[in-house]
Every structure is written in structure tokens, then in C-alpha cells.
Image (cartoon, rainbow, N blue to C red):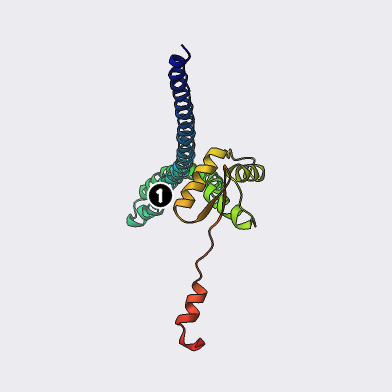
Amino acid sequence: MPDSQTPTTELTSQYTAQVAGDLELNAKEQERITAEVDALQEQLRALQHDHTVLTHLQKTLGVASPATQPAVEEAAAPSVPRQKTGTKPGAGKQARAKKAPAAQDGKAATKPASKKPAAAPKTTGTAAKATGPTLVELIRRHLADQSEPRSAAEVATTLGQAHPDRAIKTTVVRTTLENLVAKSHVQRSKQGSSVYYTTAEPEPTAALAEQTDPATA
């Protein structure tokens, strides 16, 4: 009986270890996909914000151009009495009667034009909110100011405290750091089970310049 139970126990332990490993891989994959989704949502919000700003600017530019038409009609109105130079006594009265409605139409047309420029300050305030450093710029500046490597959690905590108005998550910061590592803008190092990041060192171009410059020889 003990000999028959030994293979069963070994199989059970193997299946248990395999299931535990699969669960760990599944959790890591879920974390990676969640980070990518958060990064895409942040990009979508930025694009939606830019779309709103551009829409306001388009409306402002589209409404401001027709506002010059009443001024053209107003300038053309005084030319009507000059053409009629007859000596008939009723000619002056008719010219004045035509000139009065034209002036009233000009006043009525210029009233909405005075309200249109007021829309411009709204767009400038909205456009000012759109300006600001991106998450990539914040991460690169933070790593450049550090003398030691930093983990994704440390970077997210520091940036979250410095910018409380922005929802900075650790998963998004980790994904952004990995993208910078892929572009050789950030270096990654491991200490045990932890991963740390530091800014990439610039290439020694000065030494190459000294070797190729004949004046320094």
C-alpha cells in the first residue's frame, strides 16, 4: 500500500506546482494588460482634451470672418445719395428716407458682432490648461535629478505627491518606464527580485571629437 501511494503523492505535488506557476503567470499578464489599458486611457483623455480645444478654436475662427460683412454694407450705403444729383425737391427726402433704414440695418447687424469677440478669452483659458509636461517628461526629469536608481513605485509616489491633480498610478509608470527602456532613454537594473530604473548615460561624444579633431593632435 505505501508503494502505491508514493506515485500519487508525487503527481499531486507536480500538479500543485504547475497550477501555482500558471496562476502567477496569469496574474502578471493581467497586471501587464491593465497597465497598457491605463496608459491608453490616459492618451485617449489627452486626445479628447485637445479635440475640445481645437473645436473651440475652430468655432471662434469660423464665426469671426463673417462679422466684416455688415461693415462693407455700411460703407456702401452712403454712395446711394451721391448718384442722385437731380434738382427735384422730393429727391432729397427720398434719399434721406433710404439712408435711414440703411443706418438702422447697420446698427442691427453690428449688435451681434460685438458679442462674438467675447468667445476668444474662453478658448485661451482652455488652451492654457492643455499645456503642461507629459508623464514621460515628468519621469525623465525625475530620474535625471536622482543620484541613485529608483523603482516604479518610488517614482509614482514622488510624482503623485508633486502633482496631486494628476492620477498617477504605479502600473502606468512601470509601463512608461519599460517603453523608455526599449528606446534606450532609461536603463533598468535588478537587485534581487526588485527592478530599478535610472536615466541613460549619454554617449562619450566628447572623447570621439578629441580623437578626430586635428587641432588637438
Please say if 180 is above or below 115.
below
Q: Is residue 112 above or below residue 81?
A: above
> Could you say where residue 1 lies in the image, as x and y percent from the top left?
46, 11
Towards the viewer: 185 or 89: 185
* Furthest residue in direction top, as rendered: 1
Can you identify the residue that label 1 sits on?
Answer: 65
Q: Residues within 10 Å of mark 1 (few under 14, many from 20)?
A: few
| Marker count (numbered) | 1
Image x and y of residue 173, in percent: 54, 43
Q: Position of residue 198 (x, y in %)?
A: 57, 54
Amino acid bearing label 1:
Ser
Q: Is residue 1 visible?
A: yes
Image quadrant where residue 98 sits: top left
Q: Nearer the viewer, residue 31 or 81?
A: 31
| Residue farthest toward the right in the current orientation of the protein | 161
Q: Secondary structure at mark 1?
A: helix
Name the side, left or right, on which 90 lies relative to 34. left
Name the spot of residue 201 as percent of width and height, x first: 54, 62
Residue at (61% x, 49% y) in the render: 150
**In front: 167, or 107?**
167
Residue 66 or residue 208, whichever sits in front: 208
Residue 107 can be seen, yes or no: no
